[in-house]
Structure formats: structure tokens, C-alpha cells
């Protein structure tokens, strides 16, 4: 059986098991690589601390990955040189599992005895989720937004210089404004923060 070496690398980093979240992180990196044509000069902002972040940290430079755990499957990749940003948000209910599988998973986590037949059903469901994540087109996995977004500039007197966000009209320090498609926006309006 042929195995993609990047998938093997992230699976090894996670302890040898390919989970749906790990596969999702791999697909997020793959989508950003397709968008930017390379992973050079790419930084990532991840809004969860699931196994997806292990995949992203393994495939990108660890120092270029920032994690803010908001419990959301949102991944933002920024090409530092061009200022292009791709925001990938997992489509809701993609990983929803029937209650019977959740109870099996809870028993496994607690170290309780699980019947072999239950374990087989659970493993088949996990395998089908991994297969779905690995083979589905990115548009079926993620809501994808692309934009040009870069900081307005770096100023030596950044603590003293203010400007208005063009959307919410709040006064914001210049070093906290972002140029998004030609508009000067604060981090919240630019959707840099979740």
C-alpha cells in the first residue's frame, strides 16, 4: 500500500494513529499549499488545540504557527510576503457522530471494558471519517475565504498614532489596523480574531 510521506510524518508525530482531526489539519495545510503554491513564507493561526494543530505544526515551521484555543476548527494561513490570507472553517456537523459512537468513545477514554463488536463499529466509523476527509474536495470540508490582508504598517510611535476602523469606526492604534482589500480595519472587523 502506498502512503503519502507527509501523512506518515504527521501520523508518526501523533503516535501512529491517523484521526479525523489529524487528517483535517493535513487537508488544511494542503489547501494553503495549493492556494500559495508553496509553504515557504506561510504562517498559520489555528483556533483549536485538537490533533489538527499537530499536523499543521509538523508540516509548517513550528515557529510560524500560533494556536489560540477557541474550540473551533478554523485555520488561517497567511503568505507573509504577498499578504494573502486564506481562512478555512470546517463545515458544521462534519464530524458529528451518532450517540452510540460517542458513548463507546467515552468508555475507551475512561479505560472501561468495551465489547469487540462495539470497538469494530467505532473503528469503522473513524476510518470512514478519515477516508471522507482525505478524499473529499476542500470545498466540501471547509468554508473558504480568501483576502489580501496585511498590517497597515509598523510605526516607531505606534502607541501614539491612532486611526479609525473603516467598518466599526472605533479609534484603533495604527499597529493594530489591517489593510483588507484596501480598507483599514481593526482585527475584529478584519476577522483576524475569531
Image (cartoon, rainbow, N blue to C red):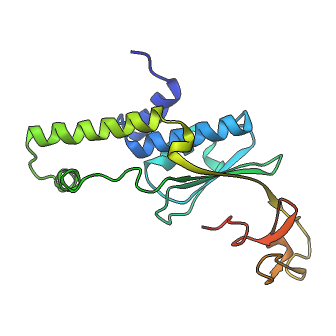
Quarter of the rendering containing residue 2: top left
Which residue occupies 70% across, 39% down?
35
Percent coordinates x, y for residue 147 in the rendering = 76, 54
Question: Is 36 above or below relative to 156?
Answer: above
Which residue occupies 53% across, 36% down?
137
Which residue occupies 25% across, 53% down?
98
Q: How many marks?
A: 0
Left or right placement of residue 115 versus residue 150 in this view: left
Q: Nearer the viewer, residue 111 or 72?
A: 72
- Quadrant for the C terminus, please: bottom right
Quarter of the rendering containing residue 99: bottom left
Looking at the image, the residue that sits furthest to the front is: 140
Q: Nearer the viewer, residue 53 or 129?
A: 129
Percent coordinates x, y for residue 145 in the rendering = 67, 53
Percent coordinates x, y for residue 48 in the rendering = 49, 58
Left or right placement of residue 76 versus residue 49 in this view: right
Left or right placement of residue 125 versus residue 55 in this view: left
Percent coordinates x, y for residue 82 in the rendering = 83, 46
Amino acid at each position: 500500500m502506498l502512503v503519502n510521506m507527509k501523512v506518515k510524518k504527521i501520523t508518526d508525530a501523533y503516535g501512529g494513529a491517523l484521526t479525523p482531526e489529524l487528517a483535517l489539519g493535513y487537508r488544511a495545510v494542503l489547501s494553503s499549499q495549493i492556494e500559495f503554491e508553496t509553504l515557504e513564507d506561510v504562517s498559520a493561526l489555528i483556533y483549536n488545540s485538537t490533533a489538527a494543530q499537530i499536523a499543521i505544526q509538523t508540516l509548517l515551521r513550528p515557529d510560524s504557527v500560533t494556536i489560540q484555543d477557541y474550540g473551533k476548527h478554523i485555520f488561517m494561513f497567511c503568505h507573509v510576503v504577498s499578504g494573502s490570507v486564506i481562512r478555512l472553517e470546517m463545515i458544521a456537523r462534519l464530524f458529528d457522530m451518532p450517540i452510540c459512537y460517542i458513548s463507546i468513545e467515552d468508555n475507551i477514554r475512561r479505560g472501561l471494558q468495551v465489547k469487540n463488536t462495539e470497538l469494530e463499529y467505532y473503528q469503522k466509523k473513524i476510518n470512514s471519517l478519515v477516508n471522507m476527509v482525505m478524499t473529499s474536495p476542500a470545498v466540501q470540508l471547509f468554508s473558504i475565504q480568501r483576502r489580501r490582508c496585511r498590517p497597515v504598517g509598523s510605526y516607531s510611535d505606534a502607541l501614539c498614532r491612532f486611526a479609525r476602523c473603516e467598518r466599526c469606526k472605533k479609534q484603533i492604534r495604527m499597529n493594530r489596523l489591517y489593510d483588507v482589500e484596501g480598507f483599514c480595519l481593526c482585527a475584529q472587523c478584519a476577522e483576524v480574531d475569531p
